[in-house]
Amino acid sequence: MGAKHLMLALVALGWCATQAQAQQVCTMRADLVKMLGDKYKEQPSGQGLVGDRAMLEVYVSDKGTFTIVSSYPNGVACIIAAGNSWEAMERPKSVTAL
């Protein structure tokens, strides 16, 4: 998944959330990654840096479940969004401005 697609997905998923929906679950990244793999069979699909403060990661399973995680330099990671029916998109040859 390309960075532009990831950004579009984030805008669609998370940035429109209300305060009640915006609550995050945070724990140590190593524990979260292990849980996503063990419980949901989700593996890393893509990642990107958010400035110098965080790394955004997408975990996806073969069954279509997905989790979007924000990881921080102190080792803490927070679940930003999770859902079903993930579909990988073909990476475009070039990206045009929106």
Image: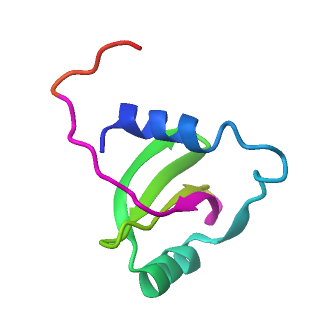
In-front residue for pair 29/93? 93
Quarter of the image where the N terminus is located: top left
Q: Is residue 43 above or below residue 94?
A: below
Q: How many marks?
A: 0
Report the residue at 56% width, 61% height from top: 82
Looking at the rendering, which quadrant does residue 96 occupy? top left
In-front residue for pair 47/73? 47
Q: In this picture, which residue range is highlighted in magenta?
A: 74-92
x, y percentage for residue 71?
Answer: 57, 57
Looking at the rendering, which quadrant does residue 85 occupy? bottom left
x, y percentage for residue 75?
Answer: 61, 65
Quarter of the image where the C terminus is located: top left
Q: Is residue 81 magenta?
A: yes
Report the residue at 20% width, 21% height from top: 94
Q: Residue furthest right?
A: 19
In-front residue for pair 21/93? 21
Q: Residue furthest top?
A: 97
Q: Is residue 10 magenta?
A: no
x, y percentage for residue 26?
Answer: 70, 67
x, y percentage for residue 46?
Answer: 36, 52
Q: Is residue 38 left or right of residue 92?
A: right
Q: Is residue 51 above or below residue 74?
A: above
Q: Is residue 35 left or right of residue 85?
A: right
Q: Residue furthest bottom?
A: 38
Say how the picture is coloured: rainbow
Q: Is residue 12 above or below residue 72?
A: above
Looking at the rendering, which quadrant does residue 65 occupy? bottom left
Q: Would you say residue 51 is visible in this rendering?
A: no
Report the residue at 39% width, 57% height from top: 86
Q: Is residue 54 left or right of residue 91?
A: right
Report the residue at 56% width, 35% height from top: 11
Q: Residue furthest left?
A: 93
